[in-house]
Image (cartoon, rainbow, N blue to C red):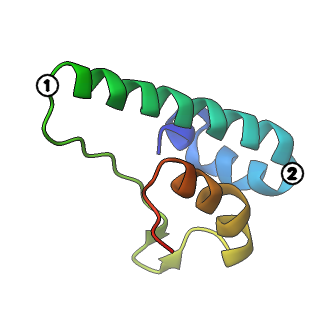
């Protein structure tokens, strides 16, 4: 969600299609920062770290399965939050 906060949700959704290189860089940077925040929290004694993302609205997914597989899934795997 930090990528959406930084770029704006509408812009992020459009950039998945029109600016994929920029979007990959943005999402990689956000992931790197989140991982570092989690590491710092663990070093400080945190027992639990919760990060949330949103991939859908009440009406369905925010983007196609193809976009999910290209932009989201690799980062979930890198972050250890995907078990498939």
Disc 1 vs disc 2: Cβ atoms closer than 8 Å? no
Residue beneath disc 1:
45
Q: Position of residue 43 (x, y in %)?
A: 24, 21
Relative placement, left or right, of 22 versus 13 is right
Relative placement, left or right, of 83 versus 45 is right
Q: Position of residue 40 (x, y in %)?
A: 31, 20
Q: Identify which residue is drawn at 85% across, 41% down.
A: 21
Residue 39 sits above or below residue 60 on the image: above
Q: Identify which residue is drawn at 62% across, 29% down.
A: 29
In this orientation, which residue lies closer to the viewer: 36 or 19? 36
Residue beneath disc 2:
18
In this orientation, which residue lies closer to the viewer: 37 or 56? 37
In this orientation, which residue lies closer to the viewer: 68 or 63? 68
SS for dot 2: helix
Residue 44 sits above or below residue 21 on the image: above
Disc 1 crowd, CA 10 A, few/some/many (<14, 14-19, 20+): few
Q: Identify which residue is drawn at 61% across, 58% down.
A: 72
Q: Position of residue 6 (x, y in %)?
A: 56, 31
Q: Identify which residue is drawn at 56% across, 49% down.
A: 78
Tell me which numbered mark, 1 or 2, is placed earlier along the sequence.
Answer: 2
Spatial CA distance of label 1 from label 2 is 42 Å
In this orientation, which residue lies closer to the viewer: 14 or 69? 69
Q: Position of residue 16 (x, y in %)?
A: 75, 54
């Amino acid at each position: 969600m930090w990528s959406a906060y930084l770029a704006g949700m509408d812009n992020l959704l459009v950039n998945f299609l029109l600016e994929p290189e920029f979007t990959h860089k943005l999402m990689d940077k956000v992931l790197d920062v989140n991982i570092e925040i989690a590491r710092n929290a663990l070093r400080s004694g945190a027992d639990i770290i919760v990060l949330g993302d949103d991939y859908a609205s009440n009406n369905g997914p925010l983007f196609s399965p193809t976009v999910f597989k290209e932009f989201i899934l690799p980062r979930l795997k890198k972050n250890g939050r995907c078990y498939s």
